[in-house]
Amino acid sequence: MKRYTGNLVLELEDVNTGVVETVSETNMVTNAVNDILGVNPMGVMYKAGGQYDDSLTWNEELLPICPNMIGGILLFPSSITEQADNLYLPSTNLPVAYASNDVNATANTKRGSMNLTESMKLSDGFKFVWEFTPSQGNGTIAAVGLTSKHGGANAYGSEVAVDSTLLQIKKVSLDDGDGFINDLFRCVTVDFHFYGSYTPYGIFMDGGDGYWYGFANQGNSSGSATVLWIKIRKSDYTFTEGQWTLSNATLMTMGSFKEGSSYPSGNRSAVVRNGYLYVPSYDKTGVYKINISNSTDVTLISLGFTSTMKCLGETGSCDCCMSIINDIIVAYDFEIDVNDNVIATFAGERCGNVSTPFFRYKEYVFAWGGAYLNQYRYTWILTPYLATICNLSQAVVKNADKTMKITYTLTEQTV
């Protein structure tokens, strides 16, 4: 039986004094690679739609495992629970630094570079070497983890570039016309009212608390917002519904859908997280946080800039302008962590033509959507996973007076 063990050597050199601080640690290996190669959710490894399948070529993107599926590094400000299934961390512990399997040619100061000369395949494993200049990767470092080459490029997103946080590995054409979107709404509309007739304005979401929630509004540029809501218990489908009047709140339209005879359309611009509804402001300069259980508890989170609030993926008859990946709210040009801190990101498309929320199973992410006469099921790998976990015995601080070199060796052992 084979298993991998890892050894980390982290060196911080003061550019003024030449003093070198060295930290050496060993790591644990998670289930990340085994999951990706072994679980096959929804038969993603199988050919499903004939000529209309759009599948990733794994060679060079994910294979060989090193330096692709394992080819990047993430550095965290807090320690990490050492469990084999601990693949993604909460947004309270986002990476302060990272690097991929190449040289960083961008202006991203969180990102370092791989030393392509010293990094190499070994007879029993792989040796990775990364370097950070004085201006790169600064912050407190308490834990380190190997990740994919894509995960190490920009982690969950940066202000300077869009990389494949969501790496599309499959796009399957669906042949059931508009049914796949229509069915998402039919089973829970019961007695719920919608605004609009030609295009009903409304959106349904999973609250993660044993209930589904539905909300309907028409965007208002001034005055107070009126929101229709419904709360549906998953266990027995009983529901309550009502109406909010939110004083001095100007909301974008949260969502809409249409059962077309030729194709469906679906749009969403709101999410539910931890008992709160998040809706962009009409002027796109902030996001309202509304307590689902107490609609008088409303907070406007300022973005600090005017968002474009475009859809996350390609434009078409379906689009998704805001969704959740793990506990991070993701939009076209910003993210909001679980503590409601706003993180500006590079504005760009992150996925295909998506209408539904993202659904994650281990490292795989699924969503459905389409454009006019074409509907698809998308499958991605969420690339900033933890392939290894290495906690430092004592946290270190990297600042602008220091360079940093990390040598991480993975070796195969027979047990």
Image: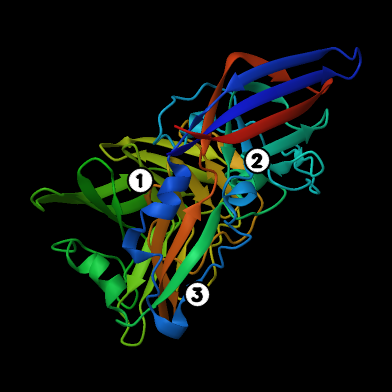
Reading the image, the residue beneath label 1 is 272
Q: Which of 216 and 180 is in front in this view?
A: 180
Q: Mark 2 points at which residue?
A: 126
| Mark toward the start of the polypeptide (3 vs 1) | 3
In this rendering, the answer to whether 388 lies above or below 248 is: above
Mark 1, mark 2: which one is toward the viewer? 2
Q: Which of 156 and 120 is in front in this view?
A: 120
Look at label 1 and name its amino acid. Answer: Val
Amino acid type at circle 3 is Asp
Q: In the image, 378: left or right of 154?
A: left
Quarter of the picture holding the N terminus: top left
Say if 311 sits above or below 342 in the image. Answer: below
Q: What residue type is labelled 2?
A: Phe
Measured as percent of width and height from the top left, residue 325 is found at: 45, 47
- The residue labelled by disc 3 is 54
Q: Is residue 411 visible?
A: yes
> Which callout, 2 or 3, points at the residue further toward the start of the chain?
3
Label 2 neighbourhood size at 10 Å, few (<14), some (14-19), many (20+)? some
Q: Is residue 258 left or right of residue 26?
A: left
Q: In this view, does 169 lie to the left or right of 160?
A: left
Coordinates of residue 39 in the picture (x, y in percent): 36, 53
Q: How has the structure been colored for display?
A: rainbow
Seen in the picture, residue 14 relative to 351 is either above or below; the reply is above
In space, the residues marked 1 and 2 are separated at their CA atoms by 42 Å
Marks 3/1: CA–CA distance: 31 Å
Sort mark 1 into few (<14), some (14-19) or many (20+) by Cα contacts within 10 Å.
many
Cβ–Cβ under 8 Å for marks 3 and 1: no
The part of the image, by quadrant, that contains residue 125 is top right
The crowd level at tag 3 (other Cα within 10 Å; few <14, some 14-19, many 20+) is some
* Residue 225 at x, y percent in the picture: 38, 51
Numbered disc 1: secondary structure: strand
